[in-house]
Image (cartoon, helix red, strand yellow):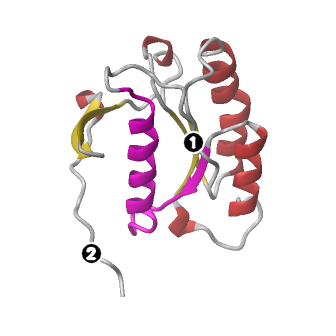
Amino acid sequence: MRQQTASLPLLRDLDQPFVWDIRMYNRSYRFEFSDTASPEHYTLLTPDFVILCYDINDRRSLVNVQQVWFRRMVESYMRDRDDIPIMLLGLKRDLRVEKEGVIYPQEGLKVAQDLRCDRYAECSATTGELMNEVIEDIARIAAKTTTEAGGLSNGGCTVM
């Protein structure tokens, strides 16, 4: 039986950054998410947390995360900001089928470890599988990047 989850609002590219105000750890937080599918614009952002996403059923997307996004964004653009947590997130978990090129969790976790990411997770937005857990992980990690004054802390994240 599929668990009912609250539906997320429709997100349109023109509405970026996507903003959510939440309360956690007895404090209020404002999360602003930006989709950087266009590599020309990521240099305009000053993130406190980076989520690198790939399609579980498309090996090229994982290679792209490693060779393009990680190299350009993390190693080049943010080389002086080693206090920013990085998450590798596998998407479209519901479409994982036994075929050549599919990426299994242990391989995704190995890539996350090789890239020295702070967290690895997978989910499916279509079925909602692991969505609540991923959103909770993202919120917890992002909350740990702040101090009472609002700045980055020296805290860390663990690899799941």
Rendered location of residue 82, percent (x, y)? 63, 21
Q: Which residue is mark 2?
A: 4
Q: In whole angstroms, how far apart are the C-alphas of marks 2 and 1?
A: 29 Å
Nearest to the observer: residue 44 or residue 59: 44
Residue 120 inside the magenta-drawn segment: yes
Residue 74, quarter of picture: top right
Rendered location of residue 47, percent (x, y)? 45, 23
Q: Which residue is mark 1?
A: 157
Q: Which residue lies at the image location 72% right of the left edge and 36% below the top edge?
A: 116
Q: Which residue lies at the image location 68% right of the left edge and 62% below the top edge?
A: 105
Residue 15, quarter of picture: top left
User: Quarter holding the N terminus?
Assistant: bottom left
Position of 152 relative to 93 (above/below) = above
Mark 2 belongs to which amino acid? Gln
Q: Earlier in the sequence, mark 2 or mark 1?
A: 2
Q: Which residue lies at the image location 45% right of the left edge and 25% below the top edge?
A: 48
**Left or right: 78 in relation to 132:** right
Query: Dot 2 lies on which element?
Result: loop
**Residue 138 can be seen, yes or no:** yes
Mark 2 or 1: in front is 1
**Left or right: 35 in relation to 11:** right
**Residue 125 can be seen, yes or no:** no
Nearest to the observer: residue 59 or residue 160: 160
The region drawn magenta spans: 119-147
Position of 91 relative to 29 (above/below) = below
